[in-house]
Amino acid sequence: MEIYLDANATTPVLAQAREAALAAMGDLFGNPSSVHGSGLRARAILQRARAAALRVLGASQGRVLFTSGATEGIQTAVLSALMHLRDRPQAGLARPTILYGATEHKAVPEAIKHWTTVLCLPWDVVAIPVKANGQHDLAWLEQHLPSAGLVCTMAANNETGVVSDLEGLQALMAPSNALWLVDGVQALGKLDLQLARRRIDYAPFSGHKLYGPKGIGMLYVRDGAPFTPLIAGGGQESALRSGTENMAGIAALGAVLEALESGTVFASHATMARRRDQLASALNSAFPGVVFNAPLDKSLPTTLNFSVPGVSSRLLLDLFDAAGLRMSGGSACGASKAQPSYVLQAMGLPDWQTSSAVRLSFGAADDATLVDEACERLRACGEALRATCQSGQASPEPTAPGLFTRFVVDGACCYVVADAESQRCVVVDPLPQLTQPLVQWIQCRGLKLAAVLDTHHRSGLESSAAALRAAASECMSEDARLYTWNDSLGWPIDATLIALGRHWISRRNSPGAVNESSAYLVHAPDALVAVLAGETLTPGDQRTHEALQDLADAVGMEALLLPGHDPLNTLATTPSAALRAQEHRTQKDVECQPAQIRELLQAATPPVLIDVREDYETRVGAVAGLNAEAIALSALANALPRLRALPEATPVVFICRSGNRSAQAARALRRLGHQNTWSLAGGLAFWPAQTTQTAHAR
Ligand code: PLP
């Protein structure tokens, strides 16, 4: 069962809201502008929803119009304010400044940029700085307010949950002539906005953030606030927003607002705060050293934004997803890009925190059992990180390393070659970002570092071999300590091989795209296991081709090559495949739909199923209904010789979280010759049908 903890991105639709929407699409299907009975019944829905909105928002004076969502509400408010400022310049404000909070949702600064451009208004648009606690710097605002025409300040932040000091803002805004937009999206249902009591001119809201459907929202407009319709047409919504109303959405939103008023569906502020504290303490015990990126006493009672030292948000999100905990890094809009959070940057947090933040946000309709279960799973996630040496802490029983472990940073690979018996290892092509994780990985497993090698000097990338040797000085093996005269790639002078217990590494000069370039050959007693091929696989250049030919002469056309520079996620190849032009480059080539996999499972020759998620993921999230062998992508090189030796009739199916890593694995195995290789399309999210645990949403 999955536990959805990403309520600031969106929420499921409340059962009452679904029923209301269905009714509005069924018997109550009429057009609210029609004057006959069907129209009148539809209009009643509209009126009832609007009345509930005015009550819930504490907006006894003012208007609420239904929009497609908060982004539309923001456009309408910004357009209205700019038109007013343009057409009726107040005294001394021929060029008003437009101010917006530095941590606003992108919809606000983007709307300002868009509409000032469309309206040809060359006005200064300036971000209001926030303090370290995420709240607006009111002293700065006070200083800049006299020249401001519009001030935009969200009520609560979507990434951090930081609640703005609306009282402090109100005190500044009350005597000011500037128009005031407050984005209320994340506050609805969690804070009492009392709009009538405040001087707020515009407040947009979004249905899908509070158990309504997507595509419906509302905009509060204070009585007397300037207004310019964004959409003109048939005159609906008193001509403030034309177009036939989204009646299903409005009915659903009305049902949510009434549920909010009833006080029986959503948890109280105190209850939510207690649950948030329970989750925070589970995080503290699961990940000692965890840092909360916003002060809890200044945040929404449903949001925790945190970073774990030494653990990337990508890794944490994969781990949580495997445990069935759905969270996001930073904001949902930025979730697919691994970029630092501009919100945390605006708060002045250090780089490691801004780029490794995770957001946990639950909903006002979630119940105590969901929170209890989430806490349990968070603790299991902490255990999994410790056991797989991914956290900075020692592990009583660390997992034994395979011969090869691959680390990837932006298309560049680093390998650790480790011999479990002798406990000796060699790092090939270290990267600066990996210095600490590698030391942790080696130390936690009690390994001795016998050498740190580069295959070549990567253009634009600094080798961190010296930094790694220094940082890992305590784990250097005795013989490595004696190699003071290493050459510039780290190979011990005069040595012909580096011994790793049963295994050993030899070196072959292999000038490819760069002159000084080595391939490292990893041998077992009876065979060459694989070649760490470094730069020699850079496609498309004659020297690369020659280097590959040369390497092939030495190691054979079918030797397993592991590229060090791997922007295309080749993962593994052979000289013969690398010299051939044909490639399986797209994910689609190897995809297999869940139904086809079910068929394969019934066939006479059943498939070999391999789960390539990392160890920490498979520990917390075994796949129900699939008897898959767990071989992490980072350790797949160890299994490739066995898999490529399978009979062609035996299908191999790789699976992973999203279908991306499994496709890489499948393409690699096909390249190595086993054509009957597949990847579960879409990943485990589609296997089996997942259900989400959320209270009141069934
Ligand atoms: N403002 C905030 C604070 C938000 O969190 C969001 C959605 O993420 C929006 C505006 C945009 O809302 P909508 O999706 O309804 O356009």
Image (spheres, helix red, strand yellow):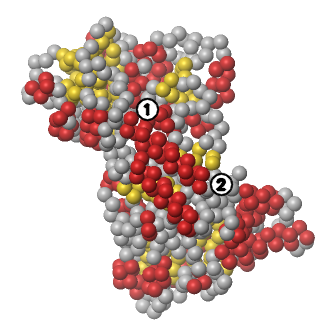
Q: Image check: 25 left or right of 343?
A: right
The verdict on label 2 being within 8 Å of ligand 1 is no
Q: Which label number is shown at residue 496?
A: none
The verdict on label 1 being within 8 Å of ligand 1 is no
Q: Which residue is mark 2?
A: 695
Asked if one can make out residue 633 in the rendered structure from this viewpoint, the answer is yes
Residue displayed at 27% across by 41% down: 436
Up-down: is 79 above or below 385? below
Where residue 611 appears, x then y in whole percent? 51, 28
Q: Nearer the viewer, residue 263 or 112?
A: 263
Residue displayed at 56% across by 68% down: 269
Q: Which residue is mark 1?
A: 615
Up-down: is 606 above or below 384? above
Badge 1 marks a residue whose secondary structure is helix
Location of the N terminus by quadrant is: top right
Where residue 315 appears, x then y in whole percent? 42, 42
Nearer the N terminus, badge 2 or badge 1? 1
Residue displayed at 48% across by 78% down: 166
Q: Residues within 10 Å of mark 1 (few under 14, many from 20)?
A: many
Q: Amino acid at mark 2?
A: Ala
In the image, farthest residue toward the right: 37
Where residue 295 appears, x then y in whole percent? 40, 65
Q: Amino acid at mark 1?
A: Asp
